[in-house]
Image (spheres, helix red, strand yellow):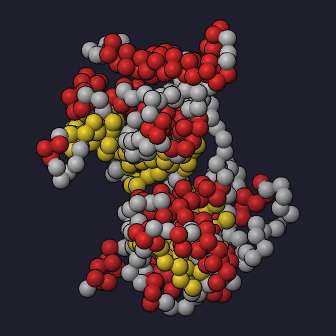
Amino acid sequence: MLLTLSTTHRPATDLGFLLHKNPERAQSVDVSAGRVHVFYPEASDERCTVALLLDVDPIALVRNARGTATEGFSLGQYVNDRPYAASSLLAVALGKAFASARRGVSKERPDLVDVALPLEIHLPALSCRGGVEMAQRFFAPLGWTVGARPVPLDETFPHWGDSRYVDLRLTGTQRVADAINHLYVGLPVLDDAKHYWVSSDEIDKLLRAGEGWLATHPDRDLVTRRYLAHRVSFARAAMSRLAEVDDLEPDSLDDAVVTAGSGDEQDERPVPLVLQRHGAVVAALRASGAARVLDLGCGSGALLAALLKEGALTEIVGVDVSHRALEAAARRLHLDRLPDRQRARVTLLQGALTYTDARLRGYDAAVLMEVVEHLDPDRLPALERTVFADAAPGTVIVTTPNVEHNVRYEALLPGGMRHRDHRFEWNRAEFAGWATGVAARRGYAVRFLGVGTDDPEVGPPTQMAVFTRSAAVAGEDAA
Ligand code: SAH
């Protein structure tokens, strides 16, 4: 499920300061329902867009809701719209990812916090009970121009009518904090579904988020009822279920319900760096719109497995010089047991990235995740030619360790590297020097992102460069 927020305020990248999210970095945070990725598909002075993508983990959803999410139809816990539609879950993610922004706090640009900026919000699939009219009723009184289009149940059979989903665009001049609070309350209110978090201070949360606008909203009562009603019914269901399982005394149930809550905002489990790297690479691939991708130096295929889950990718090619690594990848992906349609999306190729390889031509994107540091420095020009001149995909994503961060690893000896096969590890300036040189020589634009916690002194543990082939060169190709 996806939400984008854009501004044309100048410089538009001020949005990053207001959201406490650097446009140069893709970031991921875990919430109880899955993982939220925050990234910027565009970030120029004229226009800046932040995207919030919640990857719902249906299993975690059921696990974390154990004892609270009683549904009459138990398969419904696993098979439902939650992974796809913007709903109450996205509101929790939004509240967590933009917690300070929502409170109207900005360290770098406190002066901007109270300024209304030209904003656009897009929710391609909003779960909306009451359809377009309900979306209008909620957002228009708050000063938004509402562009809402019902999503038909099935494009091929228009007479089946509309689904409960709405493609929603909001435009208006608003404070960023207000915009986030409108969504934070609006998403669960419009969704009006039973999948809901249970927590002791739901009323406080509503009043805090609604400060300055809810009291005067023409549909104040409806909004309040919808926001809280399901909590009440859910809490009741949870109590009866808990009573069944744990045989608790009714008096202790209130406490039990509170502790069984998903704890949306206090949930701060760190995400392992390797998964943050997958998240960042996948987010960059999604933003590039790629359908056919190369995973160069795919190793045992951990990223390939993540790429297979991306429905937008029609062709996924893993390349590695090591036959053993490719065998491990085939096992990990269960290639021999995949259904034909899935099997047809993946190819594993043995090859060396330091030699021209015609099989690698014509792809939309290539990933080199933690690969360059495995090559001897004098082989880097050969890799540059193979990848950027011969294969020449539209987008190239490169990740590599940031050696400055090594001092933060207690287990590393001073001057030690992270892996015994690493031939070098670059600091940020060295990586930027190499990447900008490649971009200039090969007709690409490059931007840099950090992956993992950005240490104020030594930077993030992983550095990432996203290269985009310039239009002129792409055009020459077509000619
Ligand atoms: N991308 C994977 C694996 C990284 S380890 C991940 O992030 O988990 C680096 C991989 O690059 C190894 O599998 C190694 O076999 C491969 N590799 C190293 N030099 C290579 C070369 N010249 N051509 C192709 N693959 C190479």
Q: Report the quarter where the C terminus lies.
A: bottom left
Q: Which of 261 and 108 is in front in this view?
A: 261
Place of residue 186 in the rendered image (x, y in percent of width and height, measured from the top left): 36, 28
- Relative vertical location of residue 67 with respect to residue 384 in this rendering, above or below: above
Quarter residue 206 falls in: top left
Residue 267 showing in the rendered view: yes
| In this picture, residue 254 sits left or right of residue 169 | right
Place of residue 313 in the rendered image (x, y in percent of width and height, measured from the top left): 41, 66
Looking at the image, which residue sits at the far left?
Answer: 159
Residue 17 showing in the rendered view: no
Place of residue 194 in the rendered image (x, y in percent of width and height, measured from the top left): 43, 27
Q: Which residue is drawn at 54% across and 56% down?
A: 279
Q: Nearer the viewer, residue 54 or 231?
A: 231
Q: Report the quarter where the N terminus lies.
A: top left
How many marks the image carries: the answer is 0
Looking at the image, which residue sits at the far right?
Answer: 413
Q: Nearer the viewer, residue 416 or 302?
A: 302
- Relative vertical location of residue 221 with respect to residue 11 in this rendering, above or below: above
- Relative vertical location of residue 12 with respect to residue 69 in this rendering, above or below: below
- Relative vertical location of residue 335 with respect to residue 156 in this rendering, above or below: below
Q: Which of 357 and 34 is in front in this view?
A: 34
Ligand 1 found in image quarter: bottom right
Q: Residue at x 58, y 74 (%)?
A: 330
Q: Residue at x 20, y 51 (%)?
A: 155
| In this picture, residue 413 sits left or right of residue 52 | right
Quarter residue 423 falls in: bottom right
Quarter residue 391 falls in: bottom left
| In this picture, residue 24 sits left or right of residue 192 | right
Q: Residue at x 32, y 43 (%)?
A: 125
| In this picture, residue 31 sits left or right of residue 88 | right
Place of residue 405 in the rendered image (x, y in percent of width and height, measured from the top left): 72, 58
